[in-house]
Image: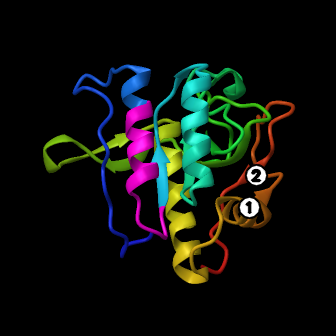
């Protein structure tokens, strides 16, 4: 989507995909301290509620880095987890190819928008590709559009990027959308 970006990975989990909240917070804090503007970030991980992690992502957001986070894949209220329940992030739920809420996707008032998350061809280990599903697939779509927005409009505060994404999303098209969850599907508009 945003093919000319400089991409930097920040590893916070083991090869098995597990780690401590303190490791995740250290990674977020590193990005807060070392990013070069304009910057956007993807966070395709989450877990139980952590005020310390929520504060770390809020600090990142306030530093000017637009941060999209995965809502999670447990079909529960995203507001009960971190970082998806943090007040200063853009939380992304997953839709399928028919614009229905993906059966696994978390939901709730903390969700800002849905992105394509089911049967997504993605990069994988060893330079290969694999078809994957999850809110971790939906979130990078949002980050890509946010990067295009910043490339087109210059570095803008995170809230400005968030407002643009929400305003330009396609409203009311997600079927099976739980009550209280914003019904908005990512749309890149004229970018």
Marking on residue 92: none
The residue nearer to you, when weighing 112 against 96, is 112
Q: In which quadrant of the rendered image does the C terminus lie?
A: bottom right
Magenta: main secondary structure: helix
Extreme residue toward the right, this view: 179
Q: Position of residue 136 (x, y in %)?
A: 47, 39
**Quick one: label 2, few (<14), some, or many (20+) residues within 10 Å?**
many
Looking at the image, residue 111 sits to the left or right of residue 135; the answer is right
Crowd class of label 1 (few under 14; some 14 to 19; many from 20; radius 10 Å) = many
Which of the two residues, 25 or 188, is positioned nearer the viewer here?
25
Residue 104 lies in quadrant = top right
Q: Position of residue 15 (x, y in %)?
A: 22, 27
The quarter of the image holding the N terminus is bottom left
On screen, 18 above or below 45? above
Q: Mark 2 or mark 1, which is nearer the start of the sequence?
A: 1
Secondary structure of the residue carrying tag 2 is strand
For residue 7, which quarter of the picture? bottom left
Residue 128 location (% of width, % of height): 18, 48
- Identified at 19% across, 41% down, the residue is 125
Q: In the displayed structure, does residue 123 sit left or right of residue 22?
A: left
Q: Which residue is mark 2?
A: 184
Q: Residue at left 37%, top 71%?
A: 5
Residue at image coords 43%, 47%: 120
Q: Is residue 23 visible?
A: yes
**Residue holding disc 1:** 169
Do residues under tags 1 and 2 come within 8 Å of each other at their CB atoms? Answer: yes
> Relative to 30, is 41 above or below?
below
Q: Which residues are magenta?
A: 25-39
Q: For this rendering, which residue is in front, 157 or 112? A: 157
Residue 149's x, y, as percent?
A: 59, 73
């Amino acid at each position: 989507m945003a093919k000319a970006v400089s991409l930097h990975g920040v590893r916070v989990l083991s090869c098995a995909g597990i780690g401590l909240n303190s490791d995740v917070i250290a990674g977020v804090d590193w990005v807060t301290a070392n990013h070069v503007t304009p910057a956007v970030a993807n966070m395709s991980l989450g877990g139980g509620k952590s005020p310390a992690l929520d504060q770390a992502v809020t600090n990142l957001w306030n530093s000017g880095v637009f941060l999209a986070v995965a809502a999670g894949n447990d079909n529960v209220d995203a507001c009960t987890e971190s970082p998806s329940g943090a007040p200063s992030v853009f939380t992304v739920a997953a839709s399928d190819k028919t614009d229905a809420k993906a059966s696994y996707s978390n939901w709730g008032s903390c969700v800002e928008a849905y992105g394509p998350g089911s049967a997504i061809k993605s990069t994988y280990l060893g330079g290969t590709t694999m078809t994957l599903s999850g809110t971790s697939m939906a979130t990078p779509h949002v980050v890509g559009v946010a990067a295009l927005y910043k490339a087109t409009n210059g570095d803008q505060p995170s809230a400005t990027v968030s407002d643009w994404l929400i305003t330009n999303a396609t409203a009311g098209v997600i079927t099976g959308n739980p009550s209280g969850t914003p019904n908005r599907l990512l749309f890149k508009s004229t970018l």
